[in-house]
Amino acid sequence: MIGLLKKDLLILRRVYMKNFFLVLVLYTVLGIALKMTSFFTLMSWMYGFYVMSLFNVDNACRWDFYAATLPVSRKTVVTAKFLLLGLCIAAGFVYSLVTAPVAHLLNGEPIAESILASLLVTLILIIYFALTIPLTYAFGPDKARSAMLLLVGVAGGAILAAASLGGGAESVLNGLFGWMETSLVPGFSVITAAAVVICLVCWLVSCRIYEKKEF
């Protein structure tokens, strides 16, 4: 397991190290210059895409053929990807925690509110990327990416349609997430539990798909 994580981390360092620092500096500068603190929550999104890009690298070098000869189970190979995804998204969340005081100085956002917003974004991203992994194992990185974009597009279209019938996008979003303002702890508990369950199901499905694949 540790060896698999080191292999992916070394690839990330070799391929994305310069891009990592560029994005880190760019998002920080944009967030401060434009006073758009939403940039501070986007690092988890970027780090998640770094992990998903590893599937393209694995396909290009035919890694799965080599992995099949290693003394590790296929379940371990899948688990390593999920663990790396969790570590990278957690790193993005830590960055948003560090920049929470900056958001407070720029826009007067309460630090607690910034942290909760970052946590919500992080949980949503965990669900998004967890759903992407089994699709990637089943159909490949490109088709999985297209499928998730289609899913997001359908969800966005549904929100816009509901907004056109109701009182606008803001009222729809308040209907979806407004209940959390009055039930903060239960609300985050529900979303956290949903993220854990979805990750577990996606991991099980990914393991089943990968174990049945022929290389």
Image (cartoon, rainbow, N blue to C red):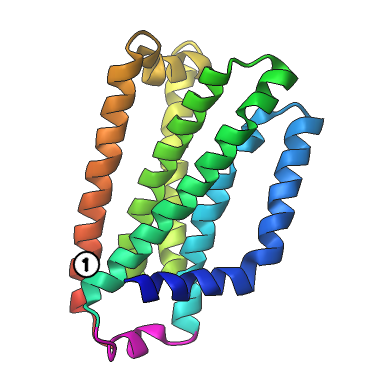
Regarding mark 1 in the picture, which secondary structure is present there?
helix
Q: Quadrant of residue 120?
A: top left
Q: Residues within 10 Å of mark 1 (few under 14, many from 20)?
A: many
Q: Indicate yes or no whether the magenta region holds residue 65.
A: yes
Please report the residue visible at 28 percent of the width from the left and 49 percent of the height from the top: 199
Is residue 28 found left or right of 76 in the rendered image?
Answer: right
Is residue 27 found left or right of 200 in the rendered image?
Answer: right
Q: Position of residue 191 (x, y in %)?
A: 31, 31
Please report the residue visible at 69 percent of the width from the left and 49 percent of the height from the top: 24
Of 147 and 89, the residue lying toward us? 89
Q: Position of residue 131 (x, y in %)?
A: 33, 52
- Name which residue type carries label 1: Cys
Q: Quadrant of residue 32?
A: top right
Of 3 and 76, the residue lying toward us? 3
**In the rendered image, the vertical position of residue 117 relative to residue 28, given as above or below:** above
Residue lying furthest right: 33
Q: Indicate yes or no whether the magenta region holds residue 37.
A: no
Magenta region, residue range = 61-71
Of 144 and 11, the residue lying toward us? 11
Q: Position of residue 45 (x, y in %)?
A: 53, 47
Residue marked by disc 1: 207
**In the rendered image, the vertical position of residue 142 relative to residue 198, given as above or below:** below
Q: Position of residue 148 (x, y in %)?
A: 42, 52
Number of numbered discs overlaid on the protein picture: 1
Q: Quadrant of residue 180?
A: top left
Work out whether residue 160 can be spotted. yes
Please report the residue visible at 47 percent of the width from the left and 20 percent of the height from the top: 163
